[in-house]
Image (cartoon, rainbow, N blue to C red):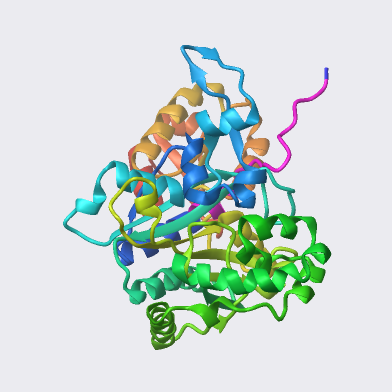
Amino acid sequence: MAKIQIPRGTQDVMPGQVELWHYIEQKMRELCHRYNYGEIRTPIFESTDLFLRGVGETTDVVQKEVYSLAWIKDKQTKELTLGETQQEGLTLRPENTAGVVRSYVENKLYGAANQPTKWYYIGPMFRHERPQAGRFRQFTQFGVEAIGSADPAIDAEVISIAIRLYEELGIKGLSVELNSVGTLEDRARHRTHLMAFLENVRHDLCPDCQERMDRNPLRVLDCKVEKCKTLTKDAPSILEHLSEESAAHFQAVQDYLAAIGIPFTINPRMVRGLDYYTQTAFEIKMAEIGAVETLCGGGRYNGLVADLGGEDMPGIGFALSIERLLLALEKQGIALPVETGIDCFIVVQTEQAKATAFKLLDQLRQAGVTAEMDYLGRKMKAQLKASDRLQAKFTAIIGESELANGTVVLKEMATGEQRELPLGELAGAIRK
């Protein structure tokens, strides 16, 4: 019988690796607490219509990458075409901004006294795309959302959260690329000039860009195909068509970033891949990460709350992949200070001592000591080797004489020093 293997584009995070995840996630939680962002947890799957309306029907994410599920009704699976599935079904979340905004609207947070609403999330996302280094079909995102303020200072705050996280983890060589994609009115003015330019090169563009021209021509400027980059290098910039208000907002974001010492470059071609972005858009990159250099991306999404049925409230956020963050740490040779090993391994010399050892093991654990014992009936020498493999700080040995005396021999593994003490004093001695 053939082995059942892990689905392509997914991974098992094993003991020995998962501790790095715990460390990073704790850093994220601590950082967000300092910035006064609370955690939100939304469902892994949502109505497909949420992503059609929120992320955008014209995006590559919705067109090519979503995992949609058949609609389940009365315990019977209704047969649906792909189009019907998108209209009526459920979709594994490809990103979480839409879900967070849906929750914000559904719980009427726009009426809350404390504004803006500041949330963060950590959780799995799903996209059907070609797996490569730092890119999976199931991946974990950390993101923040600030909803309810149009102040450019909060744009700078959101960017700073991502930068400070990378800095606190020791990552070097970061660059912030900044752009404004303007308001809907700004983009309408720009679209007229951009389409006039693109029509002259339409048939030389890649097939994806030819489709984007009709759906969302601004995204042609973000194409990664070298030929398309060359053909569009002189295309009209969105920055040339910003309203006075949008231009002032963009300049203020730059001023706030400069005030807190975060360097950036302006990239007028960077538009991001989701339709909900307005005004500020940004990416954080690391040149040496490999084929995928973008570590983080985000931007402002004024209008999304209203599109999903709420009052018209501005918002801004970002998301980053923890898998890609781990790849960056690996590329730069950064070892996180993750604790390994256990406090104590109990070695049993005789079968008669096992019940006492098991009771002692429970007492140690209740006292806050990480402890383990042998469950394979191994000889004393093999148990000591197991203690070494688990990187135990102490080994507690119980034999015939210790059992008779109600004592235990405690050995400190780093020094080899050992002493005999009453069973009831073991936990306190280890904690010291």
Location of residue 301 in the rendering, given as x and y in whole percent from the top left corner? 43, 61
87 relative to 421 in the view: left or right: right
Image quadrant where one finds the C terminus: bottom left
Q: Residue at x 39, y 39 (%)?
A: 364
Q: Residue at 52%, 52% (x, y): give it.
A: 141
Tell me if residue 9 is in the magenta stretch.
yes
Residue 167 vs residue 251: left or right?
A: right
Q: Is residue 155 left or right of residue 292?
A: left
- Name the residue: 47% across, 82% down: 262
How many circles with numbers are drawn on the protein?
A: 0
Residue 29 at what x, y percent from top left?
39, 57
Task: Classify 283 as above or below 408.
Answer: below
Q: Quadrant of residue 365?
A: top left
- Chain part drawn in magenta: 2-22
Q: Within the image, what quadrant is residue 315 found in?
A: bottom left
- Above or below, comparing residue 149 to residue 104 in the picture: below
In the foreground, 275 or 214: 214
**109 and 165: which one is in front?**
109
Q: Which residue occupies 28% across, 52% down?
A: 311
Query: Whole-percent x and y of residue 130?
Result: 74, 48
Magenta region, main secondary structure: loop
The magenta stretch spans residue 375: no
**Residue 188: percent from left, percent from top:** 51, 67
